[in-house]
Amino acid sequence: MSDRAYSNEIGPEIAALRERLRSFINAEVIPLEPLLDAGGEAAALAMSGLKARARELGLWALGHPAEIGGGGLPFMDFVYMNEVIGRSYHGQQAVGSLSMQDSIMLHRYGTRDQKERWLGPLVDGDIYPSVGLTEPEVAGSDPTLMRTTAELDGDEWVINGHKWFTTGANVAAFTTVFCETEPERQKHAKFSSIIVPTDTPGYQVKRVVPTMGSTLGGHCEVLLNDVRVPRDNLLGARGEGFVIAQKRLGPGRIFHCMRWLGQAQRAFELMCDYAKVRYAHGSVLAEKGEIQRYVAESAAEIQAARLMTLDAARLMDAGDEARVQISLIKFWGARMLHNVIDRAIQVHGGLGVTSDTPLEHMYREARFARIYDGPDEVHRMVVARHLLKDPVGNAPW
Ligand SMILES: Cc1cc2nc3c(=O)[nH]c(=O)nc-3n(C[C@H](O)[C@H](O)[C@H](O)COP(=O)(O)OP(=O)(O)OC[C@H]3O[C@@H](n4cnc5c(N)ncnc54)[C@H](O)[C@@H]3O)c2cc1C
């Protein structure tokens, strides 16, 4: 189904590259998932092997700009790749796309020194970045409430604050900390982003917060007590923190949604395969109307989400910020992901909630999608506010 949705736009070279990527993810990454999930030394070794193999196959860092050592794929071509990468929740790390948005931000807004220090190792997958926006004391969905501050003292920023959900901070080389630097300005213009190496005195990962699911490095609570970094660690201009965050989040959400499609498609295939062999009450499950409804509804939801995501991506590729379309796919895609995995679990019965299939892990990861990068309610609010002002704004005629 996915090939037909893309058939008008993908040339033979990109189709062949995507096929190579698909067989790498299916044949080499997915079989190692149980080992990678277990963590520890064996997992780290297996992941190094996968990274080396991705390089050998010409699949490494495909979407990073060529001038910083990446594959230089144009935006839309990389959008298509993400559906394949997303089939495994370890896919991003295995093919070096995990740090892509951070690398692009650094490439676009960083100083020469920042780029020299961080960009090469980021693109090579030798170090990981992290982003510190959310704070436990205030609503992350309204980030203008953020309380972390940075003040200039001579040639140094002195940062104080409390973050959490700084994903991967415990393994990252640096955190891009969002903080108030311009208290006299209005709303978003108060905030800047500053690169803080995680070994700076005063930067402390207080704990990896136990959560459902499991993602690289865990979700960390971070204390910043009189953290001093050079003035030049500012990323972009003063007061530009949210401009940078927005540039990062827009394309990032499209890549997220494409990867969710990869997860949903895999769950869909597992559901169909099992329904064809499980026998109960006189027939295999696939012959029962209720199960056929699960199959048909899942197919419709996946295809709708795919076309909506591609529509948002095309708009963005044409230079539009695509705010409404991005918010539409963020809550719609997250719900589709949840629904399809949920039905796949249901069809598997008790087996579906065991770790003998990947579905229970996929389900835990999928639950995050309705919260990170903005909860569903906030994205629905964005859509509704725009369309109440201009009800025909999203119609293509
Ligand atoms: C897996 C995961 C990874 C994350 N990684 C990072 C990271 O790397 N860096 C980082 O900085 N943050 C990260 N986050 C944090 C994430 O961005 C926040 O959790 C999110 O923005 C919501 O903020 P909050 O948790 O403070 O919820 P709150 O803002 O307190 O919202 C709580 C709930 O209130 C409701 N709500 C909020 N606003 C409205 C509204 N306008 N109308 C109706 N209902 C509303 C929603 O149901 C929402 O879920 C991550 C979160 C998760 C789950």
Image (cartoon, grey):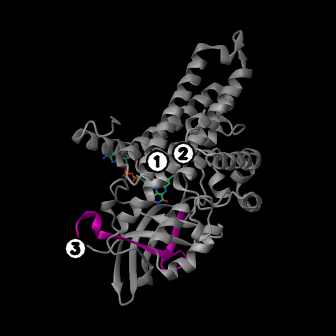
Element type at marker 2? helix
Q: CA distance from mark 1 to mark 3?
A: 37 Å
Q: 63 or 74: which is nearer to us?
A: 74
Position of residue 264 measured from the top left corner of the image (x, y, whole percent): 58, 37
Residue positioned 77% across, 62% down in the render: 45
- Residue 258 numbered tag: 2
In the rendered view of the protein, which quadrant contains the C terminus? top left
Q: Image height check: is 390 above or below 186?
A: above
In primary-sequence order, the first of circles 3 and 2 is 3
Q: Which residues are magenta?
A: 184-207
Going 67% across and 40% down the picture, which residue do you hit?
Answer: 358
Residue 396, x across and y down, in percent: 35, 36
Q: Is residue 198 magenta?
A: yes
Q: Is residue 135 visible?
A: no
**For disc 2, does the CB lie below 8 Å from ligand 1?**
no
Q: Which residue is mark 1?
A: 313
Name the front one of labels 3 and 2.
Answer: 2
Residue plotted at (55% across, 62% down): 100
Local secondary structure at mark 3: loop
Tag 1 and tag 2, C-beta contact below 8 Å: yes
Q: Which residue is mark 3?
A: 184
Q: Name the amino acid type tagged 2.
A: Met
